[in-house]
Image: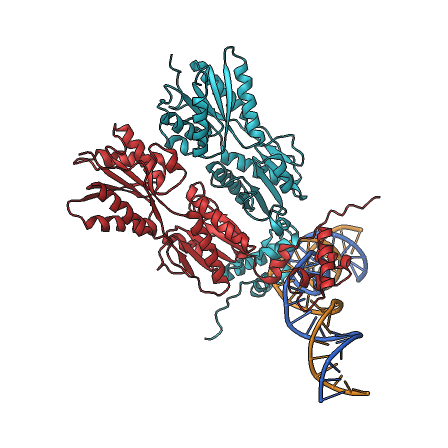
Chain colours: A cyan, B red, C orange, D blue
Amino acid sequence: MPGVTDTARPTSRDVARAAGVSQATVSLVLGGKSRGRVSERTAEAVRAAALALGYRPNLAARNLRLGRTRTALLVVPALTNEYFARVYTGAARVAAEHEFGVVLYPSPDGIGPARDPFGSARASLDGVIASSMAADALDAIGGGDLPLVMLDSDPGAAGAGATVNFDIADGMRQVARCLLGLGHRRFTHMASAVDTWTFHVRAAALAGTLAGTGDVTLHTERSAHSVEDARLAAERALTRPGPRPTALVCDDDILAAGACKAARRLGLRVPADVSVTGFDDLALATAVEPELTTVRLPADEIGGRGMAALLAVLDGRPANSADLPVELVVRGSTGPPAA
Amino acid sequence: MPGVTDTARPTSRDVARAAGVSQATVSLVLGGKSRGRVSERTAEAVRAAALALGYRPNLAARNLRLGRTRTALLVVPALTNEYFARVYTGAARVAAEHEFGVVLYPSPDGIGPARDPFGSARASLDGVIASSMAADALDAIGGGDLPLVMLDSDPGAAGAGATVNFDIADGMRQVARCLLGLGHRRFTHMASAVDTWTFHVRAAALAGTLAGTGDVTLHTERSAHSVEDARLAAERALTRPGPRPTALVCDDDILAAGACKAARRLGLRVPADVSVTGFDDLALATAVEPELTTVRLPADEIGGRGMAALLAVLDGRPANSADLPVELVVRGSTGPPAA
DNA sequence: CGCATCAAGTTATACGTAACACTTCGGCGG
DNA sequence: CCGCCGAAGTGTTACGTATAACTTGATGCG
């Protein structure tokens, strides 16, 4: 039996032929638009034929016809940071529920020319979600006319159709109050060297909360987001002239892990000699010893809400954007300072 | 001046009109096929017009016309594992060099119905790269007629157009020889509970290498890939009746981090009382104290090579598939056993 | 001079889908 | 009995691109 295998994918016309109807009817039935237009018996025959042939609509043709792709772009600074991997996971889950796809643009300065970061792929997107981006990076991204949702970013930024944020300030206030309550008075803010809104908020909330108490000192040390950089920065903070800080408030768990390493290398115990706090609640936070006191940011939820907001914008619905609550998780890296 | 703003994206026909040529000529010039077909002066005019209008080809139309999408699917078990995030990054980098895109399918049992994991998206892919998948998961993925490249997987598996692997066995042999050389004789293999080729190879290589030395014991304890599960498993291993193992050989760094926690909880010092080794060399490996001795797997490189192999298969070229070398990185979590 | 050749384009078409506009036909009220 | 209406489909077109097939002058050569 030569020529029996038909390697080409079946088209809607093949389905129509098999079901004895026209291609238009196939499109109506499989598109769910057959109510009152096609009899139930015919519709069932079409569905059966499609199933038998293993028909899958050609997305390129559909996209061309509809002018939409049901695909969103998610821009994150670095996918290898577990936080952003979780943002992606949450966004992809919600997208899948609405038959949307998510493509990633993981490192704005890592792949492709800066002038046109996404290449012509941009022309095949319905919208963009950008997480924790600097305002100028937003230019490179939002230059297009695509709907844009920003996550963990300045709500007042231009160009964003919607913004979804954590209540970051509340998280930092909880950290500060917790440490103040333990008796700490000398603080160092282990701040991210990245110049974005979320880290500005953390700095302001920390300074603002500590300002309410007299007799408190606060220094700032900046670091890139790697354990090694953070260790070096924390060693600077712990060895600078003057009274040693008793609390290192870190902008994320990676910095906090580095801070713990620095303390240990200097012969200081955590938390007896120095307390350390983080942000994010990554797997890392419970892998190190002692486990990190940290602010849990539900990353997958902000990703999911971001996707939901984008879908709302695409539908012309209003995207409600209340801040997501965060939670301070107290573990072993914090304690009262030594007398 | 009403109606001046033209919000619709320009098409190749708009460019043709602006340059005073036909749409076909635009396609030839921008497609790089103009050698000997279009004069340089005309070609330059077309390029200028395209630039002036900000023309971007419509990918849906191109895909429909060509029947190819220049998009590959990468299937990984869990993107939140830094290892797989790096695989993605490497694959995406090589893809971008060839104007390819990569979409992710991060969790085979997490998103979408198992029957048709990718939905109709499958119809818009040129190929699939699957990393570290079980043989049965391969069925769900490779069911289509798409070219398939497998990473870190059984080279003899059916259906794979190519396989790219690490020399995992060599890595494990290095671990075993290092520990034997330090004087260890009682081993526990902290094995992954995941039933895949790469972990079978690790178990076999460990057992095989230790078998060469007399007077050696090897037990196996299984664990899921979380620090907490690994801690519990390691506590079982360290408290079972009989002489305590002096070396915990772990299938990855996450398990190793859990093993270190278990030792600490039991009042054992690492490495004085028990040595611990990992696999992968994640950021985690240098975040914990002591830093982990581990086998560095260049994850981004296997991702890149996998993408290159897929591109080769798509071009009809042979995909060369030598195993990638791995490197034992000796750090503080290993040492001679206590006398 | 005349025919072949060649550069430099243009015309026309197909990819597979969605949806608008149209047809056909049975039933039903006036 | 006529006209109208709704149900059930069908014919046709357009989306934007890439390319095969064709056209048109100009040139070279015997």
Report x, y in % for residue A303: 53, 37
* Quarter of the N terminus of chain A within the rendering: bottom left
Total labels drawn: 0
> Residue A239, position in %: x, y?
43, 22
Name the residue: 58% across, 38% down.
A130
Residue B57 placement, left or right of B262: right
Q: Is residue B265 above or below residue A44?
A: above
* Residue extending furthest toward the right: B1
Side (left or right) of B290 relative to A125:
left
Quarter occupied by the C terminus of chain A: top left
- Is B168 displayed left or right of A40 in the figure? left
Q: Quadrant of residue B245?
A: top left
Say above or below: A179 vs B186.
Answer: above
Task: Relative to B315, say whether A68 is above or below.
Answer: above
* Quarter location, residue B11: bottom right
Q: Nearer the viewer, residue A313 or B272?
A: B272
> Can residue A290 be seen in this snapshot?
no
Q: Position of residue A52 (x, y in %)?
A: 50, 61
Residue A313, x across and y down, in percent: 64, 39
* B146 vs A53, nearest the viewer: B146
Seen in the picture, residue D24 relative to B321 is either above or below; the reply is below
Along the line of sight, the residue nearer the viewer: B323 or D14: B323
Depth order, front residue of B51/A299: B51
Q: Classify residue B100 by image quadrant.
A: bottom right
Specify the farthest residue to the top: A214
* Res A20 visible: yes
- Locate residue A127 relative to residue B332 in the image: left or right: right
Which residue shows up at 24% across the image and 41% down it? B188
View extreme (left): residue? B215
